[in-house]
């Protein structure tokens, strides 16, 4: 029994001698670590707030860009509808002329899309609604045509390519310096203006 009592006293003495200072040490550690943890949590919250604010700014910016793009899209749709109306009116006019047996030009086609050396682009169009008994050359030379926004009273030349290919008119449009620079100096002027 003596050994049990001695062992019990040793255990109680060890708890009092070691556990109490250990408890004090743990309390001090908690008191010093808790502010560090709360500081880290506050720092993390501040970082999340910063990221959230940046995201809100991005969302507003994207909303503004979307509105601008929507406005641009509406403007393009309006322009497309206007162009479509122009084409429909032109088609209706050509249809009326066809029904009235009045010769008219088809759509002018660019023969060469590259910049020519002489700075004149060549266009070709086919004449429709010519009757066999019509004077093809006279009809060709008196019929006006609008090419690239410019009105022409008559083509430069007319050629009759037979029944399959019909009467063709040819036009030459002078190209401005900005579209097709003539010399290296024209190219440099276009770059710096």
Image: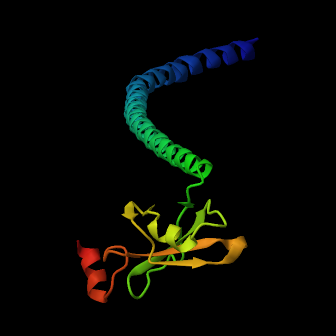
Quarter of the picture holding the C terminus: bottom left
Left or right relative to 15: residue 180: left
Residue at image point 43% right, 31% down:
48
Q: Nearer the viewer, residue 10 or 66?
A: 66
Residue at image point 71% right, 72% down:
163
Q: Nearer the viewer, residue 131 or 33?
A: 131
Q: Give the percent coordinates (x, y) of residue 90.
A: 51, 48
Q: Is residue 11 above or below residue 122?
A: above
Left or right relative to 169: residue 118: left
Q: Is residue 54 above or below residue 113?
A: above
Residue at image point 63% right, 15% down:
9
User: Looking at the image, which residue sits at the far front?
Assistant: 133
Q: How many marks?
A: 0
Name the image colouring: rainbow
Q: Give the percent coordinates (x, y) of residue 154.
A: 43, 69
Q: Nearer the viewer, residue 59 or 133?
A: 133
Q: Give the percent coordinates (x, y) of residue 77.
A: 48, 40
User: Looking at the image, which residue sits at the far right?
Assistant: 1
Q: Give the percent coordinates (x, y) of residue 113.
A: 50, 75
Q: Is residue 37 above or below residue 103?
A: above
Residue at image point 58% right, 21% down:
14
Q: Is residue 27 above or below residue 169?
A: above
Q: Quadrant of residue 64?
A: top left
Quarter of the picture holding the N terminus: top right
């Amino acid at each position: 029994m003596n050994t049990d009592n001695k062992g019990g006293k040793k255990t109680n003495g060890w708890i009092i001698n070691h556990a109490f200072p250990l408890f004090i040490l743990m309390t001090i550690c908690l008191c010093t670590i808790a502010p560090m943890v709360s500081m880290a949590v506050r720092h993390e919250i501040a970082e999340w707030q910063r990221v959230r604010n940046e995201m809100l700014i991005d969302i507003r910016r994207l909303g503004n860009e979307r509105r601008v793009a929507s406005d641009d899209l509406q403007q393009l749709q309006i322009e497309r509808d206007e162009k479509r109306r122009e084409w429909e009116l032109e088609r209706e006019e050509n249809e009326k002329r066809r029904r009235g047996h009045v010769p008219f030009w088809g759509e002018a086609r660019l023969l060469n899309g590259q910049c020519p050396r002489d700075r004149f682009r060549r266009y070709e169009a086919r004449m429709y609604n010519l009757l066999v008994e019509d004077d093809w050359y006279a009809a060709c030379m008196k019929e006006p045509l609008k090419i690239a926004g410019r009105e022409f009273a008559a083509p430069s030349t007319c050629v009759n390519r037979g029944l399959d290919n019909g009467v063709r008119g040819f036009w030459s449009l002078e190209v401005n310096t900005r579209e097709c620079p003539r010399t290296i100096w024209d190219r440099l002027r276009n770059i710096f203006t």
